[in-house]
Image: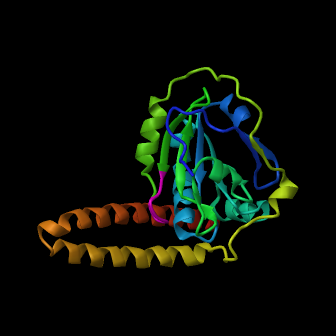
């Protein structure tokens, strides 16, 4: 299954959001470039952290007219709970059988969920950027995504054909979602505290390996920066709920 490439025409689709309302790629491109966030599900701590981080800094994406939507196999009722939990200002779309993720070449066959990825689509309908994670914790930096959005021109939208994939709200309830419990905010924050201290310990060990440990130490440092950003976003989300 080949991953979609930069410069290719993006497959058109229509999927239901958390309320069952259809989100149509062609219609969204009338307003600005599309930013599609493929994620594993509401049970994944890194997906929760990433979505919370984008939500808390959403004005940076909105200023670039990005039409943001996140996509998983989770059905609308799960997505509505996720939107309310993380206070998301963008929709979560249901791809219940993973058809869209497969069409974009972003499907993890072994786990039966999407590969964590971000795809940016110009108003012309062409793919401008693809980042597909090598593992469940591998996500692009928001700075990298924003830099690409800044480079996208104010091109007029070209016509797209009808959706290759169309799912309605009723169909979205029949999902291949793994039988795993969604993570709560109360679970997520201590999870990331543990991740932080583990990364500090590993970074210290790798730092003692001399030249051979420098690359590993840099990887751990980048990982710690990402997870710290996610933890900050989740704490901010919790404060918003309390207020």
**Which residue appears at 35% of the width and 66% of the height?**
224
Q: Is residue 155 above or below residue 28?
A: above
Q: Is residue 127 magenta?
A: no
For the view shown, which residue lies furthest in the left direction?
A: 210
Q: Is residue 208 above or below residue 150?
A: below
Image position, residue 44 (x, y; %)? 57, 69
Q: Nearer the viewer, residue 28 or 13?
A: 13
**Which residue appears at 53% of the width and 53% of the height?**
117
Q: Start and end of the magenta stretch? A: 132-138
Q: Nearer the viewer, residue 49 or 219?
A: 219
Residue 143 seen in render: yes
Quarter that holds the C terminus: bottom right
Q: Nearer the viewer, residue 189 or 9?
A: 9
Image position, residue 165 (x, y; %)? 75, 45
The colour scheme is rainbow
Left or right: 113 with respect to 173? left
Which of the 4 image quarters holds residue 10? top right
Left or right: 80 with respect to 233? right
**Which residue appears at 54% of the width and 74% of the height?**
188
For the view shown, which residue lies furthest in the top direction?
A: 156
**Which residue appears at 41% of the width and 45% of the height?**
143
Image position, residue 189 (x, y; %)? 51, 74
Image position, residue 61 (x, y; %)? 54, 41
Q: Is residue 2 above or below residue 64?
A: below
Residue 89 seen in render: no
The secondary structure that most of the magenta stretch takes on is loop
For the view shown, which residue lies furthest in the right direction?
A: 170
């Amino acid at each position: 299954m080949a991953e979609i490439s930069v410069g290719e025409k993006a497959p058109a689709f229509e999927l239901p959001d958390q309320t069952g309302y259809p989100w149509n790629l062609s219609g969204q491109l009338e307003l600005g470039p599309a930013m599609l966030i493929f994620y594993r599900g509401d049970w994944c701590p890194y997906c929760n952290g990433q979505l919370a981080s984008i939500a808390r800094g959403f004005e940076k994406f909105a200023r670039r007219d990005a039409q943001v939507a996140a996509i998983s196999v989770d059905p609308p009722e799960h997505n509505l709970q996720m939107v309310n939990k993380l206070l998301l200002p963008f929709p979560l779309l249901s791809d219940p059988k993973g058809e869209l993720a497969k069409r974009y070449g972003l499907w993890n066959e072994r786990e039966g969920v999407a590969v964590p990825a971000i795809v940016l689509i110009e108003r012309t309908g062409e793919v401008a950027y693809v980042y597909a994670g090598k593992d469940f914790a591998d996500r692009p930096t928001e700075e990298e995504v924003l830099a690409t959005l800044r480079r996208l021109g104010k091109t007029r939208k070209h016509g797209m054909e009808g959706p290759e994939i169309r799912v309605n709200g009723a169909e979205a309830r029949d999902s291949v979602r793994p039988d795993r419990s969604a993570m709560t905010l109360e679970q997520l924050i201590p999870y990331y505290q543990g991740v932080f201290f583990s990364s500090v310990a590993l970074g210290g060990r790798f730092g003692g390996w001399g030249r051979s440990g420098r690359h590993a130490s840099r990887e751990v440092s980048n990982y710690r920066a990402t997870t710290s950003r996610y933890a900050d976003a989740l704490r901010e989300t919790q404060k918003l709920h309390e207020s």
